[in-house]
Amino acid sequence: MINVKKYKIFTLIFFLSLFTVKFLNIFQQRIELITYFIWILPLLIFYYFLNKLIIRTYQWFCFILLIYFLFASIRVFGTAFFWIDALELLIISILFVHVMFGPKIINRSNQNTSN
């Protein structure tokens, strides 16, 4: 069984890997630095609230990740295929599933501490 501390570490790893993959696009000259910061800003805001373990934030963040998934899937399946886009789509999907289980882990942790 995973506890909240390990869950937060995995969340950080998934976020950092997503930021790194998107940052590689700058070196490939596929996006500009300002585009990267605009892309990353909502994720950073949500990450702050995810660390506070607010369950409603997890629900809203899943919705936001669907938007990121949509844009990544359009690049992977709609235009010329590029491996960084496929990796970004994979990490977004993993992060989505990971965040979906967040409220369950938080509730389980809260129940264990109240007993």
Image: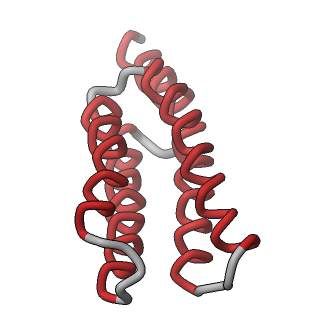
Relative depth, front residue between 52 and 41: 41
User: In this rendering, would 15 be left or right of 2?
Assistant: left
Quadrant placement of the C terminus: top left
Q: Residue at x 38, y 69 (%)?
A: 17
Q: Residue at x 35, y 81 (%)?
A: 24
The quarter of the displayed image where residue 73 is located: bottom right
Outermost residue, top side: 114
Colour convention: secondary structure
Q: Residue at x 58, y 44 (%)?
A: 67
Relative depth, front residue between 87 and 81: 81
The quarter of the displayed image where residue 31 is located: bottom left
Q: Position of residue 44 (x, y in %)?
A: 28, 44
Q: Position of residue 77 (x, y in %)?
A: 75, 72
Image height check: is 16 above or below 112? below
Q: Residue at x 51, y 81 (%)?
A: 84
User: In this rendering, would 108 be left or right of 70?
Assistant: left
Q: Position of residue 90 (x, y in %)?
A: 61, 68
User: In this rendering, would 39 be left or right of 56?
Assistant: left
The count of marks equals 0
Outermost residue, right side: 77
Q: Position of residue 61 (x, y in %)?
A: 48, 34
